[in-house]
Image (cartoon, helix red, strand yellow):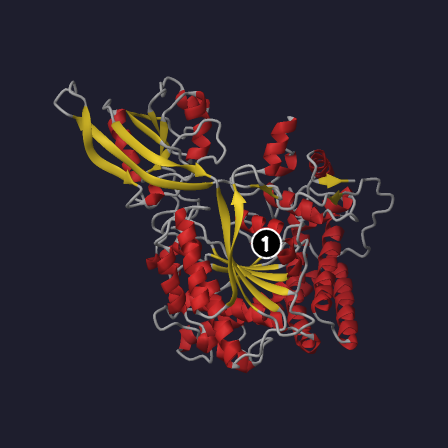
Amino acid sequence: MPLPPPLFGSRSPRCVLLLAALAVQGMAAAAAPPPAEPPLLPEAAVRALAAELSGTAAKRTVQALTLFHRMRGSRGFHAAAQHIADQARAYGLAGVEVFAFPADGTIFYGTQRSRPAWDADFAELWEQRPAEPGGSAGWVDAARIASWETRPITLAEDSAAGEVAARLVDVGAGTAEVDYRGRDVRGQLVLAAAQPEAVAPLAVERFGAAGIVSYAQNQPTAWWGEDENLVRWGHLQTFPKTPTFAFMVAWKQARSWQRRLAAGEAVELRASVRAGRHAGSYEVVTAVIAGADPALRGEEIVLSCHLDHERPGANDNASGCATILEVARALDKLVRSGALAPPRRTLRFVWPAEVEGTLALLNARPELAARARAVVHMDMVGGEPAATGAVFHVTRSPKSLGSFVNDVGEAFARFVNAESDAYAATGKADYPLADPEGSKGALQAEVADFSPGSDHEVWSEGSWRVPAIYLNDWPDRAIHTAADSVANIDATKLLRAAFVGAASAYYLARLDGGQTPALWEVVRRHCLERTAAALARHARLSAPGVPTEPGDGARLLAFHFRSERRILDSIDGFAALPTGVRRDAAAFLADLERLARTAAGETASPTASGDPSPVYRRRPAPKGPLHGFGYSYLDDHLARLGLPAPALLARDGLWGDGSLYAYEALNLVDGRRSVRQVHDDLAAIYGPLPLAEVAAYLETLERIGILER
């Protein structure tokens, strides 16, 4: 059999040596024994945080929040918001407010069309049996299949009111015309494998079904379809052409019906729903710890989460909400007691509805967006790994937004990794961060490149460009199901997430010029690791079958080192580096770039002379990403103008998919980069792609009013 290709492709021995050296540097930073002193913060501050933060207290809040079905604008969300606000006031936090931004389906907050509030009063699904043998006397209720009162997850979000007694018709996935061939579903209930919002356009709008019963499985992970008793959270369109309702059932129930239907037996169901949308508001709870420096208190470090979700929604995202509250309580108490010096910048804590609530906040209160210097966002931070399969991630900001802020989060996460690993292995550590009611295993946090999926993508988007440290679990076998319960939450995991978030936010709020030399040393070590990763990507471009253009490798390295210089500059944007440190850092980056280019065989920098492509800038409004929750600004405006979906959205790159290409393409538009330069940077971030796809995408955004030349 042929020999496998070398690890880094057909590179020079010098390149391999450099890669190996940088990899060793990275492994040493990640796997070193516990340091004599914690990173960045004084040991007294770390000791105070470790002693005060409580995973048990956070878990109690998780338990309280799981009692509410927390849909945006609903009675359940309001109750959860009031609970957070009441607790924050009880802890003595300042500036506790509940902002209310109207939401009626017509008001826009930037790119987000406000979604009316949705509430349910009653919903039940019953299987029926003949009142008498033969069925001539009608049907009576025999077994209750679903109940809003006992399990609200069984009613799909945005269901409309309805009453029907009808036959069940199996339509497979229910999303293609072939699924309905030979099946008369008019006035009946359809049994479908897909999510209700994907089924409704054909089943209800086109073929006249009275409602939907879905057994959609959980999000794809290694545990896909493993638990046949899971009931997944379901959704219908917020702005449908034909309102309808949908019930969610377990796969086990669906298969039982399918066997009976296949045998020729009729399945009769009765559905009763009293629910619907109504004008409401996006509520956002906020509190602050005021900055003590008159020159800096107008700047804010934001700690964010999202409060909305189905019941129980323990890890997603009662865990993040509870942990943010615990961070607020602990920091406020430590500052008031004198155990911690007061922050120079203001610390702000926010609890919105996911994405749409953050979009409402940043558009309706632009002064808050202007004050934000960095965000620590928590979404799913408490999953016990054995129960959920969770891996804890410290996720970076987009590469278009190079910032030292992410190095801060990484430094504290690695500190917790080392301390918790030592504790798990030996029973001894200076900072085990093990809650009395939690586990004792190592955290094993992983540093990850940017991925979307929560409010951090709103903060870091090109409209606001606020760097974010995103703390999150993935995967989670129970996400969006009735099994996402407090039983899966680990108090130790909550404590450790709270420590990483609290230490990062407090450090950023205190940062001044005297601390920047030590900060640069942290950034420098991480820079070596990132350079190793960039060189490995460069080698990937020469692998067989990878379509590339001449100069792709050189442009990848050029982008990488521009990004590293932006990270260095971002320190100066917070607190000035001493002149000597700034000079040495610049020399370090210049030397590293020369060595990396030589090792990779890229001796010349790429040139862009004679670039004829246009330069775009973003219009002042609307602000926000092009895909929100329950509404896509892009899809809506494409439909209005009769334009096709841009090919870029379907791109499958070496290191990212079409949604990531599109997100970063818009971030890279800054009024200075040409279309060619946007393309080159995109190729460096996610892999080679045709220039024409980028040009067509940006031209489309110009046509729908997002960009201008």
- Above/below status of 675 relative to 287: above
Residue 532 horizontal/vertical position (percent): 65, 61
Residue 700 horizontal/vertical position (percent): 69, 34
Residue 313 horizontal/vertical position (percent): 39, 52
Specify the farthest residue to the right.
610
Identify which residue is drawn at 34% across, 40% down.
121
Specify the farthest residue to the left.
133
Identify which residue is drawn at 59% across, 56% down.
449
Name the residue beneath numbered marker 1. 450
Asked whether 466 or 431 is in front, the reply is: 466
- Above/below status of 577 relative to 627: below
Residue 10 horizontal/vertical position (percent): 68, 53
Whether residue 394 is visible here, answered yes or no, is no
Left or right: 535 as drawn, with respect to 79: right
> Dot 1, crowdedness within 10 Å: few (<14), some or many (≥20)?
some
Dot 1: what SS?
loop
Q: Quadrant of residue 149?
A: top left
Left or right: 302 as drawn, with respect to 333: right
Identify which residue is drawn at 40% across, 53% down.
79
Asked whether 16 or 657 is in front, the reply is: 657
- Above/below status of 241 relative to 377: above
Of the 4 image quadrants, the one containing the C terminus is top right
User: The residue under label 1 is which amino acid type?
Assistant: Phe
Left or right: 261 as drawn, with respect to 537: left
Left or right: 55 as drawn, with respect to 93: left
Q: Quadrant of residue 644?
A: top right
Asked whether 155 or 593 is in front, the reply is: 155
Identify which residue is drawn at 73% across, 61% down.
566
Asked whether 332 or 78 is in front, the reply is: 78
